[in-house]
Amino acid sequence: MSPTALYVAQRGTAAILLPLVLGHVALILYAVGDGLSAGEILARTRGSTFWGLYYGLFVVAAAVHAAIGVRSVLGDWTRLSRTALDRVALGFGLLLLLLGSRALVGIL
Amino acid sequence: MPTSNDATPTELDVRIWRGGEDGAYAHYRVPFRESQTVLDVVTFVQRHLDSTLSYRFACRVGMCGSCAMTVNGAPRWTCRTHVSKVAEDGVITIGPLRNLPVIKDLACDMTEFFEKWQRAKGRFSPTRSRREPFERISPETPKRKAVDAGIECINCGVCYSACEVVSLRRDYLGPAALNRAWTLVNDTRDAEHDARIAAVSGDAGCHNCHSHQSCVDHCPKQLSPTASIAGLKRASVGAAWRRLTGR
Ligand code: SF4
Ligand code: SF4
Ligand code: FES
């Protein structure tokens, strides 16, 4: 991907993540404050299209955002070639996607 | 010493880099004078203590951009930097600019700095010939205001020396070249807009900037290369969008 495309993807996912993270934190505070048990939480998320889409989008945006960030850091601090950077970033993004999907399956 | 609680300052303890990349600091004692600049100190050493000292200057009034050095750790234009502002307990350490190869003593090789201006297409490319009338540009237009905000650059290399990304990525075009490119992107008389955007948005270009504004902090002309680079980032997105949609 060109640096400009990476920039757009990075900023775009940041814009998506910002409200999602705030919502997520608010949700945790609510759940903990209300003393909901794991079972009660799962009862609300299981089979819910809304929470499926919410956290599905969260996982994809986080995977893209973090992978590009890691690519930039490695670009600054190592002498890796552009192709190597792309591969590491892709691998890291896919790993996050996999881990995130597993968590998603757990609550759906 | 030029400290506030010393009424009769007499001498400065000056440390100056001598030699090339593997050189070392040498000590000199230089008489303290009122309204003395760091360049005055260097010139005193060269004229009275060691004539083999190499350094650069030309205008001595902050116009030519040739006198930049690292003074007590920070890049500065030495002809406009007063000793009383920077000396710490009468000690001044003067070295060559960071991020550029040292030729000898305080003189750096500026080749890569200026080559990057060229790589960023930092030169005007006219749309009209000399036989056509001048284009009239109102100073009130947003584009001309954007040009004004960045045009006073004196090519001193201070920002380049202050930029951490330049240290990390040797090919990064750097704040000065990108700031210059931004003034040309906003120059309505210029013919090379698309080529310039392409030149500044590649692997070595504007998207590498961390926006941490070290360049802004140190620029002696109070310019904001960071803002110019942010403008280039936006412009590169606009250009990519136009390419995609064929407009
Ligand atoms: S804001 Fe950008 S150009 Fe300026 S010093 Fe930081 S990284 Fe370099
Ligand atoms: S932007 Fe400022 S610091 Fe950088 S070269 Fe121009 S005048 Fe010097
Ligand atoms: S000597 Fe010209 S800017 Fe300092």
Image: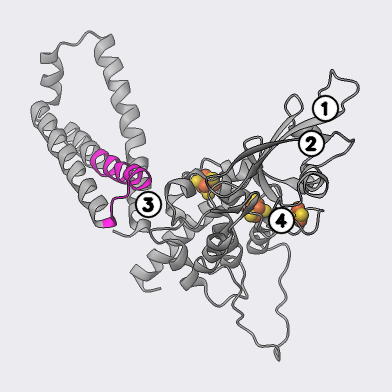
Q: Nearer the viewer, mark 4 or mark 2?
A: 4
In the drawing, does residue B184 fall left or right of residue A67? right
In the drawing, does residue A49 fall left or right of residue B186? left
As helix, strand or loop, the secondary structure at mark 1 comes to loop
Residue B91: percent from left, percent from top: 73, 29
- Reading the image, the residue beneath label 2 is B83
Mark 4–mark 2 distance (CA, rounded to whole Å): 18 Å
Q: Residue at point 83% right, 21% down? A: B4
Q: Nearer the viewer, mark 3 or mark 1?
A: 1
In the drawing, does residue B125 fall left or right of residue B57? left
- Reading the image, the residue beneath label 1 is B2
- Image disc number at residue B56: 4
The reply to whether the magenta stretch includes residue A69 is yes
The quadrant holding residue A73 is top left
Residue B2: percent from left, percent from top: 82, 27
User: Which of the chains bears the disc numbered 3?
Assistant: A
- Reading the image, the residue beneath label 3 is A7
Please tell me whether the stretch drawn in magenta is mainly helix, strand or loop. Answer: helix
Mark 3–mark 4 distance (CA, rounded to whole Å): 39 Å
